[in-house]
């Protein structure tokens, strides 16, 4: 019974992904091609610039699936510059993407799109200079759009954990490759990691672990993606879903 319930949740979630509606933002740095039909063979009628807010229109048509950079998306009907056409929703984000050259870290990006809700909460405050091997401190900040930032600092260890409501793992990957803080793990031109693998950047080995469920017809439910590497310290970057929130955890230690 539990397995049937879990599968029902998965297929319901996939259905929601296919039926995106409302306001979204273009996250393709070179802009997103706007076509007169749902497919790459359809005529291009323009390019929608990076960061543009668009509205996905409700449609009775069966949505056509398309995979690019290992991200499975759908051709969605939108209106732009008084024209109705189609775009691929693989490059859309629920929040406006980072303004180029203005931020370096995910925390700065969140501050760019929203404001804090209440003050910073310090669960335990302890100076890092005075911290012994059993010492720790935690700070938390809630934001008005529902995002959260948690910072955990221990002896020779640190972790930042972010909760991004409304993001999928694929959308989180697109966001992180736009933020310099993660450039060692996720290159600006990297495709979405659909399989576990080890890659090399210079002298550094990066272990990529992908935990997913495949359901046929191009559908896969990604549970977690993890990047591990050592470059002077040990680094661990994880993206995983917690109900309707994406969790991004970035930690390092020696």
Image: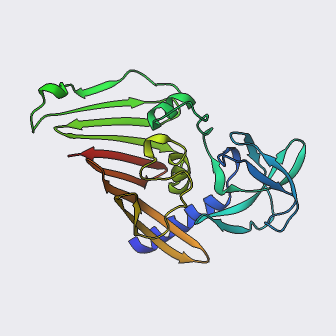
Q: Quadrant of the N terminus?
A: bottom left
User: From the viewer's perspective, is residue 177 above or below residue 212?
Assistant: above
In the image shown, does 97 or 228 lie closer to the viewer?
Answer: 228
Callout count: 0
Residue located 48% across and 41% down the image: 180
In the image shown, does 164 or 226 lie closer to the viewer?
Answer: 226
Can the viewer see residue 153 in this picture?
Answer: yes
Q: Residue furthest right?
A: 82
212 to the left or right of 63: left
In the image shown, does 56 or 42 lie closer to the viewer?
Answer: 42
Q: Residue furthest front?
A: 202
Can the viewer see residue 1 in this picture?
Answer: no
Q: Position of residue 62 (x, y in %)?
A: 77, 68
Residue located 37% across and 51% down the image: 237
Residue located 44% across and 41% down the image: 181
User: From the viewer's perspective, is residue 20 above or below residue 104?
Assistant: below
Classify residue 218 by image quadrant: bottom right
Q: Residue furthest top?
A: 119
Residue located 53% across and 61% down the image: 192
Q: Position of residue 249 (x, y in %)?
A: 36, 47
Q: Position of residue 114 (x, y in %)?
A: 54, 29
User: From the viewer's perspective, is residue 206 above or below residue 49?
Assistant: below
Classify residue 112 by image quadrant: top right
Q: Position of residue 21 (x, y in %)?
A: 70, 50
């Amino acid at each position: 019974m539990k397995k049937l319930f879990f599968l029902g949740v998965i297929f319901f979630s996939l259905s929601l992904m296919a039926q995106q509606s409302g306001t979204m933002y273009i996250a393709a740095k070179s802009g997103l091609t706007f076509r007169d039909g749902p497919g790459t063979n359809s005529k291009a009628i323009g390019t929608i610039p990076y960061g543009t807010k668009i509205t996905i229109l409700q449609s009775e048509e069966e949505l056509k699936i398309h995979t690019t950079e290992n991200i499975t998306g759908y051709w969605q009907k939108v209106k732009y510059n008084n024209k109705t056409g189609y775009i691929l929703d693989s490059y859309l984000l629920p929040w406006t993407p980072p303004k180029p050259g203005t931020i370096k870290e995910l925390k700065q990006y969140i501050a760019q799109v929203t404001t804090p809700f209440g003050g910073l909460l310090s669960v335990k405050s302890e100076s890092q200079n005075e911290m012994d091997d059993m010492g720790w401190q935690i700070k938390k900040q809630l934001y008005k759009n529902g995002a959260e930032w948690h910072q955990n600092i221990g002896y020779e260890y640190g972790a930042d954990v972010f909760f991004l409501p409304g993001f999928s793992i694929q959308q989180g990957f697109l966001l992180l490759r736009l933020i310099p803080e993660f450039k060692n793990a996720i290159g600006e031109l990297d495709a979405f990691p659909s399989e576990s693998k080890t890659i090399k950047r210079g002298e550094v080995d990066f272990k990529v672990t992908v935990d997913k469920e495949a359901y046929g017809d191009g559908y896969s439910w990604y549970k977690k993606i993890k990047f591990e590497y050592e470059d002077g310290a040990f680094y661990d970057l994880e993206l995983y879903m917690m109900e309707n929130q994406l969790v991004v955890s970035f930690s390092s230690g020696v």
